[in-house]
Image (cartoon, rainbow, N blue to C red):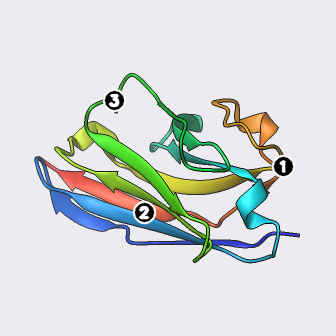
């Protein structure tokens, strides 16, 4: 069992930055690939970024590539999402998720554990 808690969301102006953090519990955290997803208002949940168990392999949605960066610290059981050059269309609830596999994925249905989400609002 893994519990995930996100933090770091908030209100920011367009062009600004935010850093989201996800804290995980459980001794098996370091064996799981992790992902960040988001759900904009009135839309379906969408993939943002993923990182494999070691942190050496990452992948991003085209909409955030070059602006967002995912990283993890297995010693601290955390995975972060650094978001730069934020745009109003980045406004969403952001979710952290854990996949019971060492490789990352962009498919939400391949993640077993989910956090409660943190709101990110980007004003124009």
What is the count of numbered marks?
3
Q: Which mark is residue 79?
A: none
Q: Where does label 1 land, which residue?
A: 100
Q: Which residue is depicted at the point 74% across and 65% down?
A: 29
CB contact under 8 Å: marks 2 and 3: no
Marked residue nearer the N-terminal end (2 or 3)? 3
Badge nearest the viewer, 1 or 2: 1
Q: Position of residue 19 (x, y in %)?
A: 33, 63
Q: Which residue is depicted at the point 19% across and 61% down?
A: 12
Disc 1 element: loop
Q: Where does label 2 land, which residue?
A: 119
Q: In which quadrant will I find the N terminus?
A: bottom right
Q: Which residue is depicted at the point 25% across and 38% down?
A: 67
Q: Residue furthest top?
A: 62
Disc 3 element: loop
Q: In the displayed structure, does residue 66 sit left or right of residue 114?
A: left
Residues 116 and 5: in front is: 5
Q: Residue furthest right?
A: 1
Q: Where does label 3 land, which residue?
A: 65
Residues 82 and 94: in front is: 82
Q: Within 10 Å of the Cα at label 2, are there few (<14), some (14-19), or many (20+) other Cα atoms?
A: some
Marked residue nearer the N-terminal end (1 or 2)? 1
Q: Within 10 Å of the Cα at label 3, are there few (<14), some (14-19), or many (20+) other Cα atoms?
A: few
Residues 27 and 107: in front is: 27
Residue 108 occupies quadrant: top right
Q: Which residue is depicted at the point 55% across and 49% down?
A: 55
């Amino acid at each position: 069992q893994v519990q995930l808690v996100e933090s770091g969301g908030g209100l920011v102006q367009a062009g600004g930055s935010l850093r989201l953090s996800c804290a995980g519990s459980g001794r098996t955290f370091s064996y799981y690939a992790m992902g960040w997803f988001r759900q904009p208002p009135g839309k379906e949940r969408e993939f943002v970024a993923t990182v494999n168990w070691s942190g050496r392999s990452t992948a991003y949605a085209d909409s955030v590539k070059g602006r967002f960066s995912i990283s993890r610290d297995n010693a601290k059981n955390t995975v972060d999402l650094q978001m730069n050059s934020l745009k109003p269309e980045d406004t969403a609830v952001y979710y952290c998720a854990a996949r019971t596999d060492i490789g990352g994925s962009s498919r939400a249905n391949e993640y077993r554990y989910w956090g409660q989400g943190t709101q990110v609002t980007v004003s124009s």
